[in-house]
Image: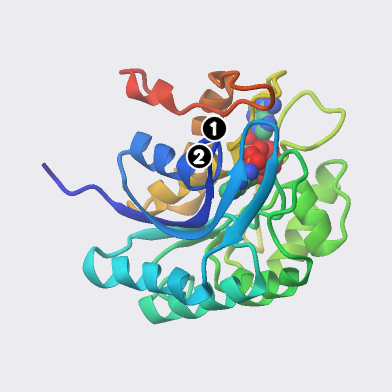
Amino acid sequence: MTTPPTVLTIAGSDSGGGAGLQADLRTFFACGAHGMVAVTAVTVQNTIGVSGFVEIPPDVVADQIEAVAVDIGIQAAKTGMLASADIILAVASACDRVGIGKDGAIPFVVDPVAASMGGDQLLADNALDALRTELFARATLVTPNLDEVRLLTGIDVTDVPTQKRAAEALYAYGPQWVLVKGGHMKNVDDCMDLLYDGDQFYELPGPRFDTGDTHGSGDTLASAITSQLARGVPMPEAVAFGKRFIVRSVRDSYSLGKGHGPVSPFWRLSTDEV
Ligand SMILES: Nc1ncnc2c1ncn2[C@@H]1O[C@H](COP(=O)(O)OP(=O)(O)OP(=O)(O)O)[C@@H](O)[C@H]1O
Ligand SMILES: Cc1ncc(COP(=O)(O)O)c(N)n1
């Protein structure tokens, strides 16, 4: 069998299996990629919320990245929960050593996870600066949701013009591409994500499903995009694929436990095409 593209997630574990590295690996698999993991934190989590987490020592996070890079090779990488400024610094320098990032050969998707969908904090307050200066500057693509946009830029996105202004503000931190996700936009019937390359805006419209079962939607979207970048697909097409992928996965999300159920990439295991 042909070796599939090899992709790395640098992310936290969700014991409930809905988000985090579990969602990333599930999506990589559904997209035909070989998934690898540098674990950053182990959360104690279910569908109701996150009751705690322990961080992996920063040098162990860096060692995981280097171990897979020197042996297996990485064709694209993404980040999820990074927990602390020290882990961010360790990830940034490991990325430089192995060539991950816009100045290296390996596409790098930075999903600036700050909190769970239930509002539990997953990133230390003092880590926002490191996220902006160390990771955004190295990123091929950053994929903030509207709460993360507010934390990172102070901009309250309420419509398409403010979504565009936020994309411009985030682009100033140095990523090659910015995707401002519209899942948290209030009082709208659709979910429009906006891609920006410093010059052109690309609108990615999509339906809004009336469901609370969207746990892991951000991770799933970023992982689907990463799996395409690993194949050398150009960014606008990779993001368009990711959007089609997440629309199907939210449509097929399922209820689990007493809280928010996960989005599901299982539809991709049937013979249906996106
Ligand atoms: N109810 C919904 N119906 C359809 N698409 C949705 C819905 N909610 C989110 N999405 C899509 O899912 C993706 C993730 O969006 P969102 O803005 O919710 O990011 P996120 O907050 O990082 O996700 P999460 O925290 O739930 O993992 C986007 O493409 C968004 O448009
Ligand atoms: C380990 C981990 N990583 C990421 C998320 C964000 O996902 P969501 O916003 O759907 O809760 C999470 N809850 N847990």
For the residue with label 1, is its CB less than 8 Å from the closest atom of ligand 1? yes
- The three-letter amino acid code for the residue at tag 1 is Ile
Question: Is residue 18 toward the left or the right of residue 192 in the image?
Answer: left
Rendered-image quadrant of the C terminus: top left
User: Between 182 and 117, which is closer to the camera in this rendering?
Assistant: 117
Residue at which label 1 appears: 246
Question: Measured from the top left, where is residue 151 in percent x and y?
Answer: 81, 59
Question: Is residue 142 toward the left or the right of residue 212 in the image?
Answer: left
Residue at which label 2 appears: 242
User: Between 23 and 271, which is closer to the camera in this rendering?
Assistant: 23
In the image, residue 134 sits, relative to residue 259, either above or below, namely below
Please identify the quarter of the rendering in which residue 243 is found.
top right
Q: Residues within 10 Å of mark 1 (few under 14, many from 20)?
A: many
Question: Measured from the top left, where is residue 216 in percent x and y?
Answer: 58, 37
In the image, residue 12 sits, relative to residue 169, either above or below, namely above
The residue positioned 74% from the left and 74% from the top of the image is 129
The residue positioned 60% from the left and 18% from the top of the image is 255
For the residue with label 2, is its CB less than 8 Å from the closest atom of ligand 1? yes
Question: Measured from the top left, where is residue 110 in percent x and y?
Answer: 57, 60
Rendered-image quadrant of the N terminus: top left
Which numbered disc covers residue 31? Answer: none
Query: Does residue 221 appear anywhere in the picture?
Result: yes
Pointer 2 and pointer 1: residues touching (CB < 8 Å)? yes
Question: Measured from the top left, where is residue 120 in percent x and y?
Answer: 75, 47
Q: Residues within 10 Å of mark 2 (few under 14, many from 20)?
A: many
Query: Does residue 193 appear anywhere in the picture?
Result: no
- The three-letter amino acid code for the residue at tag 2 is Gly
The residue positioned 49% from the left and 40% from the top of the image is 23
Q: Secondary structure at mark 1?
A: helix
Regarding ligand 2, which quadrant of the image does it lie in?
top right
Please identify the quarter of the rendering in which residue 85 is found.
bottom right
Separation of marks 2 and 1 at Cα, in angstroms? 6 Å
